[in-house]
Every structure is written in structure tokens, then in C-alpha cells.
Amino acid sequence: MSDPRELVDDLIGDLQHWLPEQRWFAGKDRPVTGVRPLGVTELVEGDPQLLHVVVEVAQGDRREPYQLLVGRRTHPPEISSGSWIGAVGDLNAYEASGDLDVTGVLLDLMAREGRVGSLVFEHEPGVELDTGLRARPITSEQSNTSLVYGGQYILKLFRKLTPGKNKDLLLHRALQGVDSKHIAPVLGSITGDLDGEPTTVGMLQQFVADAVDGWAMATTSVRDLMAAPELHAEEVGGDFAGEAERLGRAVAEVHADLAEALGTEPVDAGELERSTKAMLERLDTIAGRVPELAAHAPALRAAFEKLRTLPAGAVTMQYIHGDLHLGQVLRTVTGWLLIDFEGEPAAPVEERHALRSPLRDVAGMLRSFDYAAQQMLVGHPDDSALAARAQEWSHRNRAAFCEGYAAVAADPRDQGELLRAFELDKAVYEVGYEHANRPDWLGVPLASIARITDGEG
């Protein structure tokens, strides 16, 4: 087999074209102008060969590091066609996260706390891991890649890397330390080196085989309602309000657990000013690109400006999830679990690690309930009966979520101006995203903005 570093050097041109086609690649907004290897570690030698590779991707003046598993072997594995990167000599190289024959080495190394090159494999204190398990990739993930080992463990490989300990691992360990019941236990981790700083590249957790994600449950409930036009939301067999209430409790309990584990801080007037400025800048930027948003700009600006008048002492800052929506929660036989505490993937690392108001998570979930309901309207913008049914479902489940949250912590609706601003800011972000990626969905956040600014909630 080829020298590992030379193999990666030979793939640089292919990677420049291959990377933008991967669903986890975050830089789809501009062309790739260069790829440079930062680190190459051989994990499996021979045939097959497995390399852990970190590359720096240049997109104009932006430089971002990504993690890859690169395989090369005589007998091709059964992987998706999009995993093939390019030819090196007489063999093809491929992204190897889907190669069941080689990815077991990652778990085995964690079990024995091995070290290969700059990669350090560890299990959590007191944890004993089974070895010799084959891994299968989860195909639905977007910004990262996860491998399930024998229905027992799930290993998340963080694709876009940032120096230091990943927030997902940091918060899971903190929550585990206070016995939070709404997370899957952390079992191990993989640490590499980036810019001379130890950097989390992987996190192993217990796999919950019986879990269903919240988005799937919520959208099924919406479809049940739409299929029974003679019934109200509370009369339909798939009514979700009970689950929404339990989810609200779970989110409030996680916020309380994070506050206990990592503390809180009172907000100062400067933070409110910075939040207001960021919201207004986002509004101006997106309204400049999306004419449909410009009509709502005065009402949005007024909602954001109100933050400047809030008493600073009314807002508490702490670690939060940072990207909470129905796709980030799992329903198990024992209750709701929150996953993926990494924060908004597109946000700068400093923003993801910053202390924030828990109401930002609440606002994110309220927006997700709206999306679950209104996704049925995509392609039917003028169906008023369908719109009324969607709004009925959204209103019922948003209220149930807030009731559940209020049973554990302060009622988020008591800070209406702040919650309203956070929800509208999230909707403005959604307008920008849908305009760039799914124009047919643009009506979903725009309808929400119109309704919230008109005082309909």
C-alpha cells in the first residue's frame, strides 16, 4: 500500500470536488478554492487500509478544518456511490465511515485506551466496552457522521472541527455529573490535535435502540389531524399535546441540570445591547436579500428594539442546548432525551460556547412546532382550511410545551417580549435559510413572522 501522506497528497484535487457534495459539508455557500492536509494517521495498515485525515478547506479567505476517514483496498466495500473520492494508483480511495470491515477499530481502540499518532482513544472512568463489534452508519445525520456498534453504542464523528473540547462532550459530561435523566450516557471519546491544541474528534454514547425522534412523531400527529377534517386536534388519535407537555418538562429539567452543573450569571445591559444589535444586523442582511421579508422589517425592528428597554436583572445566562428543535429530541420508553448539544453548526465557536438565555432554546422549540404544522402547507399556500388546521395544531402543542416547562421552571410566557424577540430572530434566520436552500418553504417562516408581529402568537 502507498505511504499514507503521499496517498492523501494524491487525493487533494479529487477532494476539492468531492467535499462540496457531502451533506455534512458546511461550506456550500461558496466554491472550494483549495484543500490542504493538516494531519494523516494510519489506523489500519495493509489491505484494507484506513487513514484518519484532517484537511483544511479553503473557500476564498475562509479556512476550516474537516475530519475524514479514508479507506483503500483491493476488494471494494459495499458503500454508497457518493463515498468514492478518487483513484490512487490502481485502486480507488473512499470515505470509509460506511466500511463495516474497518470502522470497528475505533471502538476497539477506545476500549483499550490506545494512542495512534496524535489520536488519543479513551473510555469514561468505570466504563468497560465490548469489542469486536461491527459498525453501521446512520444515514439521516447532516452536520456530523454517527456509527452504531452492535445496537449498543453510537459514535459521533465531528466533521467540521474546532480546537478544544467539543461543547457536545463538555455538556454531556456536565449533565452526567449531576445524574440528568434526559441524556444518553457518554462512554468514551477520541481526541486529536488541531493547531497544537487537544481537540475532540469523536464522542461515544449509549445507543437507545427504541427511540423515535420528535420530528417524526410530531409530523405524524399533524398528518393524522389533516386526515380527519371533522375532528379537532384534541380529538384525533395521534394528538401530540401530552408528549409536548412532557417534552417541555424535560427541557426545563435539562436547563436546571445545566445550571446546577455549570452555574448561571445575571445578564448585564451590555449583553442585551449586543443581542439587539445582532438581531438587527441579521434582519438588515437577510431583508436585503429577500424582498418578501422587507415588508415585515419595521415590525421586526420594533420587536428587537424592545430588548433595550428590558431590565437586565430579569434575564439569567447559562449554558443551553443552542440548537433545540424537534429533530434534536428522542422519545424512549422512559421519556424524552435531548441530543446534539454542539449548538448551531453554522455559528462561530465562541458563540456556541457563550452563556445564553434558556429562552433561546424555548424559542427554537416553539419554531419547530410551527414548522411541523406548516410543512403540510408547502405546495398549498392558498388552502385556508389546511392553514387553519395547521395553526390549531401548532397553537395547542406550543401551549402544551410551555405548560410543561412552567411546571418545572418559570413560565417562559411571563417574559413575553424576550421570548417573542428570540422567536422572531429565529424566524428571520429561517427566511434566509429557506431562500437559499428551499424556496418553496419560504412561506413557512414568513407566515409565522406575520402572525407573531400581528399579535396572534
Image (cartoon, rainbow, N blue to C red):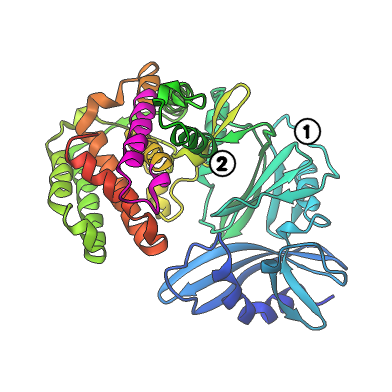
Question: Which SS class for mark 2?
Answer: helix
Residue at the extreme front: 230
Q: Nearer the viewer, residue 303 or 348?
A: 303
Name which quarter of the figure residue 311 lies in: top left
Magenta residues, start to end: 374-400
Q: Few, some or many C-alpha atoms within 10 Å of disc 1 (few <14, some 14-19, many ≥20)?
A: few
- Residue linked to disc 2: 169
Residue 150 on image: x %, y %: 79, 41
| Left or right side of 188 for 329 | left
- Based on the picture, tell me whether residue 11 belongs to the magenta stretch: no
- Residue linked to disc 1: 128
Query: Residue at 41% across / 32% down in the picture?
Result: 229
Residue at the extreme top: 407
Q: Few, some or many C-alpha atoms within 10 Å of disc 2 (few <14, some 14-19, many ≥20)?
A: many
Give the position of the C terminus as an image quadrant.
top left
Picture layout, residue 247 above or below residue 114? above
- Based on the picture, tell me whether residue 386 belongs to the magenta stretch: yes
